[in-house]
Amino acid sequence: MALAEGVNKAGETGSGKGIGAYLASHLREYGLLLALIVVMIFFQIVTDGTLLRAVNVTNLLLQNSYIVIMALGMLVVIVSGNIDLSVGSVMGFIGALAAVMMVNHGQSMFVTIIVCLVVGGLIGAAQGYWVAYWKIPSFIVTLAGMLVFRGLSLWLLEGQSVGPFPREFQVIANGFVPDLFPAGIGETLAGFFDVRQVNVLALAAGIVTAAAIVWMGLTQRARNRAYGIDDEPFAFFVARNAIVAAALVFITYKLSTFRGLPNVLITMGVLTVIYAFITSNTVVGRRIYALGGNQKAAKLSGINTERLTFLAFTNMGVLAAAAGLVFAARLNTATPKAGFALELDVIAAVFIGGASMSGGVGTIIGAVVGAFLMGVLNNGMSIMGIGIDYQQMIKGLVLLAAVIFDVYNKNKG
Amino acid sequence: MTADILLEMRQITKAFPGVKALDRVDLKVRRGEIHAICGENGAGKSTLMKVLSGVYPAGSFDGEVVYDGQPARFRNIADSEHRGIIIIHQELALVPQLSIAENIFLGNERGKRGVVDWRETNHRTEQLLAKVGLKEPPTRLVDQIGVGKQQLVEIAKALSKDVKLLILDEPTAALQETDSRKLLDLMLELKAHGVTCILISHKLGEVRYVADTVTVIRDGTTVSTLDAKAGLSENEIVRDMVGRDMTHRFPQHERTPGEVLMEVEDWSVWHPERAERKVIKNASFNVRAGEVVGIAGLMGSGRTELALSIFGRSWGRDISGTVKLKGQPVDVSTVQRAIAAGISYVTEDRKSLGLVLDETIRFNTTLANLEGVSSRGVLKRNEETRVAERYREALATRTPTVFQKVVNLSGGNQQKVVLAKWLFTSPEVLILDEPTRGIDVGAKYEIYTIVNELAAQGKGVVIISSEMPELLGMCDRIYVMSEGALVGELPAAEASQERIMSLIVND
């Protein structure tokens, strides 16, 4: 029977080259982008334009940075067919560790950051060890980790909040990249756009990135053509790139009229590019998809599945530590409750981004967009003054809807 | 006489795109008889039973089913079970962690308003177990009894549902001699109580022992219906089962095997969970360059375990013995090392062990040798595509592009993708485990052609197969495996189905 269905489907994809068929098979990718745009337009209207005010756009990025950073690692863990419930606690614990080292013991920032990232990696490795080599379900190992590191944070902070951090540490999360261009250009542009100031670097960065994305899209498209891959219709290609490029330029323009590029945006952007590259263009990335897609087949193809699982968790630990540092720097204090229930936001972002619970499916870009979708929902509802009760319910339903949409799509296809 | 017919299937045709699994099959089963259906693997026996039991609902096939005097249009299994047709599959459908009684009444629980009446359940179970001659307490867990007894539990379960027509699909495949005999005697007893049985079996001795009528199916059509009561020789059945000329099923080949390429010496493997079971018993065999060697044996004889344990110790524990390639001992302790040494193993179950189904042909083709399409850990996409294209052409894989997901391919084309994956690791020795299982005759021929080409290139090929004609048609030498030991070795010229079978049986 499976065989029969298989041949049917092959026939369909072979013949149905229309726009409708293409849209049907790529509904998920477009749907996610579309959902983000619709949600943004919706909140832009109901908040009377507050959502996309320069200060709020900056805020949105800062607020979601640690979610995005952890979503990168979580995507890898989930694609490998596992899950990590401990990231919120680990993040909180690392924040506490940083606070105790710097505030209580006067350690230098450099040493603290190195120690924190290493400790994060060790935590991930410790959990990954049980999952990979003892075949203990990751749900259980990391559930235990969640409790353990929550307790360790409390113990380390002795139940108190510790802060404030030194100035140079706060800059990690709250600082901005200074404008490298001569002030004159910025003033001219400010006069042209009729705004108070323009950070030329931010705007230039946005335009250059947008151009790079379009250029890369075009070369990819040309290459696909050469190999006769079913490519997206030109209209879709243009529309998608136009939207992405316009959104990028628009956001950097907004940032430029406030304080410029946040440091954390650079961190986030660089990490996103690195992880997108690793997952789609490297041998390790390929093997992670194989591991999640069919562990037995991967193992019989000579892939060291244990080591790969171990590495996925170690990597998650390092990223949770990085997020912990950003979070602590942003709040300028470490509290025992930091990161509480945050793992759920991270996991939700990855699933909204199209990853599959059973592994083998999901993209970095999807996870990042998923994180921002959740972020915009949070932010928009807060501006509207919607109570935390409704916010939780709505977020829950959005997650459910996204996954139902996935499953429906898969069954139908 | 017509009143005597319990089941009649007329002109049943079931087509899958590209393959006609059943082509106007006729089957007439008289009330109260044991009717055997014989045929080679892939002849269409299981498909026919799926049509009968409603797995393929009415309307998804052509032809007519008349059951108990009325036309039957079953929409699903529940429909056919309701009418008293119960099928017991080769893989038992019992829940190991539940008791015998719980299994027997699973989905059919004794009790009122959702509350189970355990006294009634256990009492009825005792009666049923007595009927099938199983002396076990109803509360014993199913995983604590052997396969033979589990088979009896399945039959007891069928009896609990007032079975009229019991279908047994290869019921003795996994059973020991004495258990098989018990089961066959039970069938005769059920027959005496008026239950009609359909027996699907390869084992012609069993068929002769119990069957009243034998229907032989070949390539999806009914070849003959034989009356077995008057005495029937196995040769008559075999002739109808094999039927066609062997030379047309296998491509011509002439081989001149060279030096010994791979030698496995004194290979022993223990069961990973049951420490007392030695699954592979001191097996030794070799393959020469340019030679195709077969390993024959029944299911469960340890063939797959032998291959898996050689290929990176992927199965079993306390593995001992040596593997030599070109006279030198090689380290095959992990899959990576086995591949590096030049050994490839094409798994028996391509869907669950061979392929990442939701990924593309390209993804699967390069999976075992990503180093070959990358530099410093970064994939070279264009190179990868070229490799996938090259194998697609070389193996004539039918697909629009190499970016097609393998789940969308037919069985034969999936198998070619698996072969491509292993060929790309440039192996010296290929072990093919059931390479043509579940694929149609045309694709089989193509796979055989590929095997011949590999041998012509001087590679050593080991074919593990349950289909004896395949081994006889393809191999230069055939090893016979039985209960974990290699019990014989036959040059192709001296091998025949009878000789192989007698080696298995006489062990």
Image: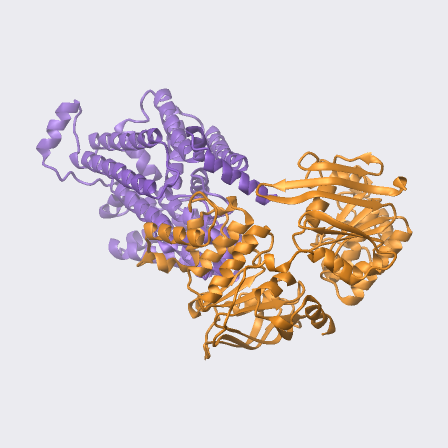
Chain colours: A purple, B orange
Residue A381 occupies quadrant: top left
The answer, for residue B209, to whether it is visible in the render is yes
Give the x, y percent position of residue B57.
69, 37
Above or below, A74 against B171 in this view is: above
Which is nearer the eye, A87 or A389? A87
Residue A176 is left or right of residue A329, and the answer is: left
Give the x, y percent position of residue B130.
88, 56
Residue A244 occupies quadrant: top left
Above or below, A249 against B140 in this view is: above
Give the x, y percent position of residue B265.
55, 78
Q: Quadrant of the C terminus of chain B?
A: bottom right
Q: Residue at x 28, y 47 (%)?
A: A165
The answer, for residue A162, to whether it is visible in the render is no
Which is nearer the eye, B88 or A377? B88
Residue B240 is left or right of residue A299, and the answer is: right
Above or below, A311 against A95 in this view is: below
Which is nearer the eye, B237 or B358? B237
Which is nearer the eye, B485 or B250? B250
Number of numbered discs overlaid on the protein picture = 0
Q: Quadrant of the N terminus of chain B?
A: top right
Give the x, y percent position of residue B301.
66, 67
Residue B181 is left or right of residue B24, and the answer is: right
Q: Residue at x 77, y 38 (%)?
A: B65
